[in-house]
Every structure is written in structure tokens, then in C-alpha cells.
Image (cartoon, helix red, strand yellow):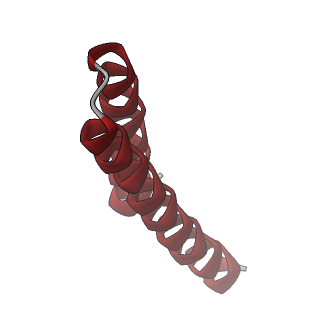
Amino acid sequence: MNKDQVKGVAKDVVGKVQEQVGKLLGSEEQQIKGLSKQICGKAQKGVGNAKQSVKDFSKD
């Protein structure tokens, strides 16, 4: 795993927690921020996956 993959997963998890807290508090703003973090986290993880694929491919 590279750092983009790790950071992406972390952002996704934080976003899920923030979304759930927003639901509990009835805060639509927090829910949206949580969803946004999840999207960013998934995108960053995707970038990390692509980097890892290129790295693995270049080794072969």
C-alpha cells in the first residue's frame, strides 16, 4: 500500500463517521461534508491504486 491508498481510506472512514454524526444531530451540512470527504477519499485511493498498478507493472 502506498500513502495515497492509506490517506484515501482514512478520509473515507472519517467521512462516514461525519455523515453518521450529522444524521444523529440532524445536521444536513455535516452529512454533506461527510459525503464529500468520502468521495475525496475514494478518489485519492483510486489514484493510489493506479500508482501501485504502474509500479507493479514496471517491475515486471
Looking at the image, residue 40 lies above or below residue 34: below
Looking at the image, residue 18 lies above or below residue 60: above
Residue 36, position as x, y percentages in the image: 38, 55
Task: Tell me: 52 left or right of 9.
Answer: right
Which quarter of the figure is the C terminus placed in?
bottom right
Looking at the image, residue 9 lies above or below residue 21: below
Task: Tell me: 20 left or right of 27.
Answer: right
Q: Residue at x 31, y 27 (%)?
A: 22
**Residue 8 shows up from this direction:** no
Total label count? 0
Front residue of 18/55: it is: 18
- Where residue 26 sits, quadrant-wise, is top left
Looking at the image, residue 38 lies above or below residue 4: above
Residue 35, position as x, y percentages in the image: 43, 47
Q: Residue at x 47, y 58 (%)?
A: 39
As drawn, the residue found furthest toward the top would be 24
Q: Residue at x 39, y 22 (%)?
A: 23
Residue 45, position as x, y percentages in the image: 49, 59
Front residue of 37/53: it is: 37
**Residue 13 shows up from this direction:** yes
